[in-house]
Image (tube, helix red, strand yellow):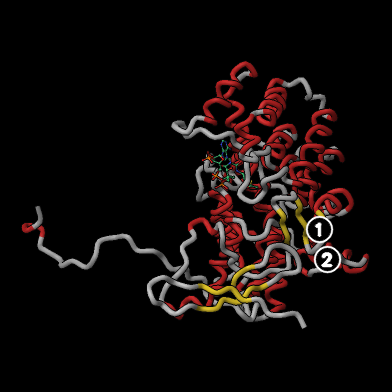
């Protein structure tokens, strides 16, 4: 039998040493189980969770140094090339790839839930037409909790499954409605004859007045974006979903919390930020100036779409997306477009610059997905919404795993308090 490994923590102030078991996963570095530390009355300090595993999970594995990403053991490159988004959803949710019969059933179960309650549509009128669609998403997805009382018992696996199917099916409909409301077009009902991704494009770009058929290459490119963004282990938005869910909150409310966390420019908002940055740069001739600004510690400007907390090598998703990006630009005849030329030049300059090489700052998936979405004519403020559609399956799979975990506890981090020590209240006239 393998010997149990133990780490010993000793102190130089007479506090007795404690033993901390070392745990191993199936892949990746070992982790030190610090739960015994609470016996000393001390906590660990780890802002940003750089050294902390918040949970154990069997869903997604990342090796940031080697640039590997697996969903349930399958390398992302294989899934992006050979699989479909719905198959990936099934895999993330259930742990295995579906058989043909499972696949058909799963697709049927999703399709019959693509419509939203008629009453939900009136929510949109409460928003300004120019509201950011992510603001609308946070509200409307959270509001699903008020419509599906029949699937909110989180201890019931069937309820959890129905909620998951509802979220996968309805989030694209809600997202497309955000766009239609924004531009003043009528909402398009889902067309269940179409595939998942094609249906989303239809709800976004079709109108009741004309026939609409999506370009199959565009469908394929968007399907890739969906697959590549489906899950990414314990990132900020997924951790938010888990933390919200740890209190027993329902999956619609938790997903809404995930959407809020995703919105930030350091996370899902980066693809939108990339295009805004390219717009600000304005011309290829300005690139050296902006690269210099990104390197200047006194300047808060950063190159959006570069760097990643976990990947210190090329993000494998970025590699696949880069390929798709070039394919889409060629298909749409956009290789010589000024904006895309600028993006490609920025990529070239940054990849050769010592500052970026030293810090292992590679273009990330958002750099390329932003460019692809722009080429597909997706409006800028919908970029992060598309990320949210794709990531819904990751959030719900991680939430489901957490609820089923026998070690589940409400997430409640501690802190290092640095505020005032105890002091007594004084009436205002006595304050200086
Ligand atoms: N441009 C310029 N310098 C950068 C950048 C950048 N985009 N990213 C990191 N650096 C520098 C930092 O200034 C720091 O330099 P220093 O060591 O001299 O102080 C060093 O690289 C390390 O950066 P940290 O901020 O410590 O790295 P962290 O892991 O905390 O941040 C993050 C990762 C937030 C993604 C960061 O790289 C960033 O802000 N990138 C731009 C935003 C972006 O593209 N986000 C998308 C992430 S991918 C996704 O959500 C799917």
Q: Residues within 10 Å of mark 2 (few under 14, many from 20)?
A: some
Q: Which mark is residue 106?
A: 2
Picture coordinates of residue 179, whole percent (x, y): 63, 43
Q: Nearer the viewer, residue 192 or 78?
A: 78
Q: Which mark is residue 6?
A: none
Q: Mark 2 or mark 1, which is nearer the start of the sequence? A: 1
Identify the element where label 2 is drawn: helix
Where residue 51 sits, quadrant-wise, is bottom right
Identify the element where label 1 is drawn: helix
Q: Are marks 1 and 2 in contact (CB under 8 Å)?
A: yes
Mark 1–mark 2 Cα distance, whole angstroms, equals 8 Å
Where residue 320 sits, quadrant-wise, is top right
Quarter occupied by the N terminus: bottom right
Tell me if 20 is positioned left or right of 41 in this view. Answer: right
Please say if 99 is above or below 430: below
Tell me the residue at 53%/49% (across/down): 135
Instruction: Return the residue at label 1.
Output: 86
């Amino acid at each position: 039998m393998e010997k149990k490994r133990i780490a010993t923590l000793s102190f130089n102030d007479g506090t007795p040493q404690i033993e901390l078991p070392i745990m191993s996963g199936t892949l990746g570095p070992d982790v030190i189980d610090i739960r015994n530390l609470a016996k000393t009355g001390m906590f660990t300090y780890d802002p940003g969770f750089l050294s902390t595993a918040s949970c154990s999970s069997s869903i997604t594995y990342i090796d940031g140094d080697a640039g590997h990403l697996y969903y349930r053991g399958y390398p992302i490159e294989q899934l992006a090339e050979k699989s479909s988004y719905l198959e990936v959803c099934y895999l993330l949710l259930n742990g295995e790839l579906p058989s043909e019969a499972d696949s058909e059933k799963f697709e049927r179960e999703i399709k019959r839930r693509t419509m939203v309650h008629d009453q939900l549509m009136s929510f949109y009128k409460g928003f300004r037409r120019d509201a950011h669609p992510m603001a609308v998403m946070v509200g409307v997805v959270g509001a699903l909790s008020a419509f599906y009382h029949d699937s909110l018992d989180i201890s019931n696996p069937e309820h959890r499954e129905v909620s998951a199917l509802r979220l996968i099916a309805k989030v694209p409909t809600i997202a497309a409605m955000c766009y239609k409301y924004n531009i003043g077009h009528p909402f398009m009902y889902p067309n269940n004859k179409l595939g998942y991704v094609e249906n989303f494009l239809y709800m976004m770009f079709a109108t009741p007045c004309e026939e609409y058929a999506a370009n199959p290459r565009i469908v394929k490119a968007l399907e890739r974006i969906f697959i590549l963004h489906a899950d990414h282990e314990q990132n900020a938005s997924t951790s938010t979903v888990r933390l919200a869910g740890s209190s027993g909150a329902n999956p619609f409310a938790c997903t809404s919390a995930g959407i809020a966390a995703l919105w930030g420019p350091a996370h899902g908002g980066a693809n939108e930020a990339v295009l805004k940055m390219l717009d600000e740069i304005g011309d290829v001739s300005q690139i050296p100036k902006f690269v210099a600004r990104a390197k200047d510690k006194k300047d808060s400007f950063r190159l959006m779409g570069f760097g990643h907390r976990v990947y210190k090598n090329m993000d494998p998703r970025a590699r696949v997306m880069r390929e798709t990006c070039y394919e889409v630009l060629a298909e749409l005849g956009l290789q010589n477009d000024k904006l895309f030329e600028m993006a490609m030049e920025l990529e070239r300059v940054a990849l050769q610059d010592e500052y970026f090489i030293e810090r292992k700052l590679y273009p990330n998936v958002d750099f390329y997905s932003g460019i692809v979405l722009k080429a597909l004519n997706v409006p800028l403020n919908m970029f992060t919404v598309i990320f949210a559609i794709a990531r819904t399956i990751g959030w719900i799979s991680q939430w489901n795993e957490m609820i089923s975990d026998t070690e589940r506890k409400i997430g409640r981090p501690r802190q290092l308090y640095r505020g005032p020590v105890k002091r007594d209240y004084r009436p205002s006239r006595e304050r200086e």
